[in-house]
Image (cartoon, rainbow, N blue to C red):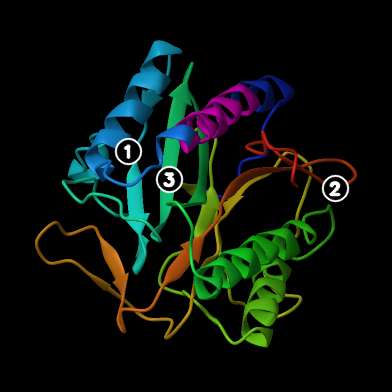
Amino acid sequence: MGIIIKTPEQIEGIRKSSRLAAETLKFLETHIQPGITTLALNDLAEKFMRERGAIPATKGYKGYQHASCISPNDVVCHGVPNSYELKWGDIVNVDVTTILDGYFGDTCRMYVVGEASEYALNLMNVTRECLRKGLEQCFPGNHLNNIGYHISEHAHKHGYSVVYEFCGHGVGLKFHEDPEVSHIAEKNTGPILKPGMVFTIEPMINAGKARCKVDRKDGWTARTIDGKLSAQYEHTVLITETGYEALTDVYGDF
């Protein structure tokens, strides 16, 4: 299909959907407490989205039955909401994608349940920094793979590994579009970035080994192979005439 350059009308639709996805995550902040199940968090997220006219893109996608992916501790991504009760000291990722008026917005972020260890907080902080390093490479004329090159360089400098089995992707008119956005890549390779491109950057950074294993029972939940922690942050990003706009950044951090 190739990389779609979005029109101004499409960009505005994607912007609204992306903002709603991010507002869903912000809404969940006060609900991330010890004792709440990941399924209950999922239901809260779905209710929030639907009350605002959106539908969750993950529900029904390739047979997936939930409105979000919720990934605590050693779960890298695609954690299936279930009866697991969050515990004091857990770190947890929530990933949502909204469809609003036919447009898609995709984002995820980490939360701390109560207080986390310095070990966990350091991983989360470096993962946020990795996303920032990737965003800094988002400007017209740059090579796409410089995003992954700088993400992996930063992660490795801090002694962490970068998950290579999952990647970012084009988004906006469909859930997954071209291009694939690798988080570990060779410098100055890949397509040239152009205004109107919209894609996700979503580095998954592991405290231990980079490999993942997918749960055979649910077919979705991907965990670290060594049981060590993983963290992830994600934004939907628009390439502008002069740089980028992080469409899902309701916090104003990026």
Front position among marks 3 and 1:
3
Most foreground residue, 202 or 6: 202
* x, y percent for residue 177: 49, 46
Q: Do the residues under discs 3 and 1 have CB atoms within 8 angstroms?
A: no
Q: Earlier in the sequence, mark 3 or mark 2?
A: 3
Q: CA distance from mark 3 to mark 1?
A: 10 Å
Q: Which is more N-terminal, label 1 or label 3?
A: 1
Residue 250 point in image, percent of width and height: 66, 33
Residue located 43% across and 45% down the image: 95
Span highlighted in magenta in the image:
14-29
Q: Amino acid at mark 1?
A: Thr
Q: Is residue 175 visible?
A: no
Seen as rendered, the residue at the extreme right is 242
- Label 1: how many residues lie within 10 Å, few (<14), some (14-19) or many (20+)? many
* Residue 223 rendering spot, x and y as whole percentages: 30, 70
Q: Residue at the spot x=87%, y=41% of the render?
A: 241
Q: Element at badge 1?
A: loop
Q: Is residue 90 above or below residue 5?
A: below
**Residue identifier under label 3:** 95
* Residue to which mark 1 is pinned: 58
- Whole-angstrom CA distance, mark 3 to mark 2, is 25 Å
Circle number at residue 12:
none
The kind of residue tagged 3 is Asp
Callout 3: helix, strand or loop? strand
**Which amino acid lies under the numbered mark 2 shown in the image of this protein?**
Gly
**The image quarter in which residue 74 lies:** bottom left
Task: Look at the numbered disc 2 and give the secondary structure of its residue.
Answer: loop
Distance Cα–Cα, label 2 vs label 1: 30 Å
Q: Which residue is mark 2?
A: 243
* Residue 9 relative to residue 181: left or right: right
